[in-house]
Image: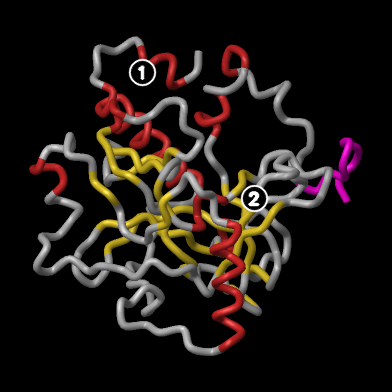
Amino acid sequence: MQMEQIIRMLTLKERERRALVRYVEKRIEEEMNGGPRKVELQDSDGEYELNDKTSDAASHIYQKQQEHQWPKNVTFSNNYEWEASVPAVIKMKYYPSDNIRRQRSNHFSRNVYFKRITDEDHPAYGQYGLFCALPHAKPGQWLLDYVGRVTLGEDQNKESDYVSEFGAHSELSCDANTLGNEARFLNDFRNTGRFPNVEFNFRRDKNGEFRQGVYVKQVKESKEEGFDGIRQDEELLVSYGKGYWRSRCNNGDLSDFIKRLPGQPPGGGKPN
């Protein structure tokens, strides 16, 4: 019996169930990796400063191209939007008051860009993907934050494909379905023939705001042989987690869903 099936048998609220699943998975991961992971908490390196002016012509053209492609039904934002249903006692743990909270400008990142997938063997062919805009994004480097509408875990939109767990105990959800930034275009690594090269890590900015950062994987946490970061124009791939896909597969069985393992060429066969 799967862990989530066992936990569902317990009489728990949705946020309590999510927190317990997150706790158990984290302990298992730490045990496998030799102890707790230490993530450096850092600010956004001036990426979204309100007084930041992108003046050079190349950047201006780039921004216009991204604006043209942005989905019309999605509000672009680098700031989280908190639903009124989140109790103040919970919100105050993660979101500073108005007089100290940092507001970020709503312009596209210089670290990444999004475009349509043109590789017919890619599981997200015809959809958008997120790509590295830097010459070399080094292991452990912060790239951008995953932003959306924050709700209680039990209030999340179960029909949305853009929901991510949020909060120190996963008691909240962050949904980029109708509001967010480029991070909403991150694709899962499964069936691409590649390993994930980025990961989500919670962090706090200099004013104490809780945010979910997208970081280049550390060398020791990457399963890719010789991994040394991400090169320009390389797609960023993350793991959505098995729970995400189990909820979308018949009876939660992933065996029929996985068609291509990392290192395998299109159509299966021996790894390269």
With respect to residue 171, does 101 lie above or below? below
**Looking at numbered disc 2 in the image, what kind of residue is underneath it?**
Tyr
Please say if the residues under marks 2 and 1 sit with CB atoms less than 8 Å apart.
Answer: no
Left or right: 202, with 253 as reference point: left
Residue 60 x, y percent position in the rendering:
55, 80
Residue 19 x, y percent position in the rendering:
30, 33
Q: Quadrant of residue 227?
A: bottom right
With respect to residue 55, does 149 lie above or below? above
Which residue in the protein does label 1 denote? 7
Which residue in the protein does label 2 denote? 128
Left or right: 37, with 141 as reference point: left
Looking at this rendering, what residue extends furthest in the bottom direction? 56
Q: Which residues are magenta?
A: 262-272
What is the secondary structure assignment of the residue under circle 2? Answer: strand
**Camera-side residue of 82 and 196:** 82
Closer to viewer: mark 2 or mark 1? 2
Q: Is residue 32 magenta?
A: no
Q: Is residue 266 magenta?
A: yes
- At a point 45% along the width and 64% down the height, the residue shown is 144
Judge whether residue 37 can be spotted in this image.
no
What is the secondary structure assignment of the residue under circle 1? Answer: helix
- At a point 68% along the width and 40% down the height, the residue shown is 190
**Camera-side residue of 60 and 144:** 60
Secondary structure mostly seen in the magenta stretch: loop
